[in-house]
Amino acid sequence: MEILIISGLSGAGKSRAASFLEDMGFYIVDNMPAAMILKFAEFCAGGSQRYDKVALVYDVRTSNSPTELFDVLDTLKHSGVCSLLFLEAEPETIIKRYKETRRRHPLMKQADSLERAVLEEKDMMAPLRQRADYIIDTTHLSTAQLRGELLRNFGSGAAEKEGMTVSVTSFGFKHGLPMEADLVFDVRFMPNPYYIQELREKTGLDRAVSDYVFSFQQTHDYMAKLRDLLAFTLPLYAEEGKTELVIAIGCTGGHHRSVAVTHALAADIRDLGYRVRENHRDMNR
């Protein structure tokens, strides 16, 4: 079992980090008081695999003082199942974020200004920051960069792959490009089954058409190079924070060559460990 406690400054990105960790397979619990964490940990230890990876969001809303979490941290760390992630940002950045979202800072009731609330929270959370296993400053991080940091610290290669879905779709150029495509590959150079009478009314999902398309060495050479390209680039897309990548394979009408190649490519990408959706936009037109 793995328990990650997410804490830090309000406006530094705890909620967004929790969302990304949920995509990585963590079970998220927000706003849990320190007094309940040990009991919840016991419950998770005796539960199903659903609770093997748990992230608890703990912040100034739930604490009278950050020091009340120290005994809990010591107990859990002694058992080797707990780590603490602390998110922070420069006060100017946090103030700007609150002004943009028009949300109310949790300490505004006891402070005479937003700036004072931000600075008071920074002082209040300083003892907890000193105990953090991981500190991420989000001042200059984009959303994708924050996700990348979390993947590097708390993910594995499998977690990165699970965080991105690859959609592979076939289409016909005469019907226009798919608007959602990130990568477009043109296979109109391959011999066209349309001109084979017995194949004309079939599609690329039929074995006879697929066998014809893949009977040519140029098709095999192209697929090998395409596999190498995707094996190199897909992990980079996942690390950068891409949650869905759309690959479009086009031929003239979207019935034969693009369908056969899309079907084969979807299987190859699935073998690399990614979630794959296969779609044939124009196959039945």
Image (cartoon, rainbow, N blue to C red):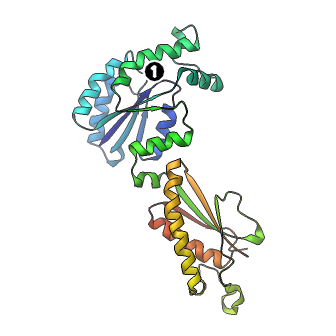
Q: Quadrant of residue 211?
A: bottom right
Q: Residue at x 52, y 69 (%)?
A: 227
Indicate the position of residue 155 as horizontal and vertical percent values: 40, 47
Q: Is residue 222 above or below residue 107?
A: below
Question: Which quarter of the rendering shows the C terminus?
Answer: bottom right
Q: Where residue 143 appears, x then y in whole percent?
A: 56, 39
Residue 80, by quadrant, is: top left
Position of residue 247 measured from the top left corner of the image (x, y, whole percent): 61, 63
- Give percent across and percent down for residue 123: 43, 15
Depth check: 20 or 126 in front?
A: 126
Q: Is residue 139 left or right of residue 195?
A: left
Residue drawn at 22 percent across, 32 percent down: 78
Residue at numbered disc 1? 61
**Which element type, helix, strand or loop, lies under badge 1?**
loop
The 10 Å Cα crowd at callout 1, few under 14, some 14 to 19, many 20 or more, is: few
Residue 59 appears left or right of 243: left
Q: Nearer the viewer, residue 183 or 71?
A: 183
Q: Residue furthest bottom?
A: 197
Residue at the spot x=64%, y=74% of the render? 258
